[in-house]
Image (cartoon, coloured by chain):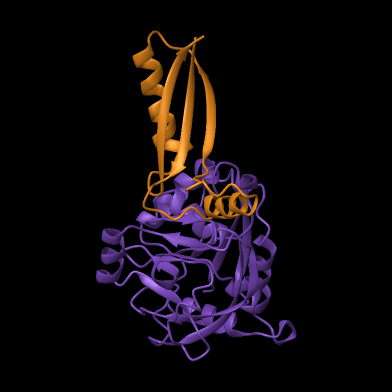
Chain colours: A purple, B orange
Amino acid sequence: MSNTIGVIVFPGSNCDHDAYHAMKHIMNAETRFLWHKETDLGDIDLLIIPGGFSYGDYLRSGAIARFSPIMQSVVDYAAAGKPVLGICNGFQILLESGLLPGAMLHNEQLRFICKDVHIRTESNGSLFTSGMKKGQVFRIPVSHGEGNYFIDDNGLNELENNEQIAFRYCNTEGEITPESNINGSVSNIAGITNKGGNVLGMMPHPERAMEPVLGNTDGKLFFESVFNRLQPA
Amino acid sequence: MYKAKINITLRKSILDPKGKAAHHALHNLGLKDVNGVRIGKFIEMDIQAESDKEAYELAETACSKLLANEVMEDYQIRIEKN
């Protein structure tokens, strides 16, 4: 049995083809696009909400996408414990829809940041990170203007206590430093999971680092870990 | 008919990078007496309602469900009769 991956396409998604290519041609998984008006996720083993500018980022990033027909199915899908991965704008959509806690602010220095950064695995308790070592460092590209993760102190404590912080920005040695916190995120946070560990949102783009020709294959290591625990429907 | 005038700003405890950048620029212009800048959104909504109260409640629902993200933003609503 092979896995079936679904990649949601909103008006304004622009990393949907990157995600499709990474899943279909690098991970060799059955992959299909899901237009945001679809509602049947029956055969999907991993749902990816890709990056981009859904609905032009009107009002706030991810705020309008949350009301697309497919999102109610995503909420039910996540509630059933199935894996949902939101990358970049996908992360913003998961925050706006309440599937993950917190919110996204403009990058502290107000610049759009597009470069490779290092992230460190903080918890390997989730479905996505179970194949990683705690402290494992990945070099993964980021590409965002609003990736400054915000949560209040109580929320942060809760994330810490439940081991929901999946990744933090770090330096090449894997140290968490103020300089490596590229966008001003609370506690260097680059990615978090829900309590159940089956919903992951992250700003970095592992799907853009899958092939030697692109100069970086850490994204493939990342997805190999994710695929570790996928169970065909 | 009523008109709701809504101001949405980042919560006071949150650093507003756009406001900070504008503050800096104003100082560079020589307006040294500007002590702080917060940048937000202004939204006008025309509302069909029977009373001020009903219009306010509708605007509040719109803010809490969509127009503002209460994790990071505060909002103020003013209702005017058209």
- In the visual, does A221 lie left or right of A151? right
Q: x, y percentage for residue A205?
A: 59, 71
Residue drawn at 38 percent across, 13 percent down: B52
Residue drawn at 24 percent across, 70 percent down: A161
Extreme right residue here?
A213
Residue A42 in view of the camera: no
Residue drawn at 55 percent across, 66 percent down: A4
- In the visual, does A5 lie left or right of A21? left
Residue B46 vs residue B17, the one in the foreground: B17
Q: x, y percentage for residue A173?
A: 49, 91
Establish if B7 lies above or below A122: above
Residue B41 vs residue A203, the one in the foreground: B41
Residue B17 in view of the camera: yes
Residue A185 vs residue A2, the one in the foreground: A185
Residue A107: name its quadrant. bottom right
| Count of marks, rendered view | 0
Q: Quadrant of the C terminus of chain A?
A: bottom left
Q: x, y percentage for residue B63?
A: 43, 33
Residue A191 vs residue A37, the one in the foreground: A191
Q: x, y percentage for residue B57?
A: 36, 22
Establish if B79 lies above or below A197: above
Residue A186: name its quadrant. bottom left
Residue drawn at 68 percent across, 83 percent down: A211
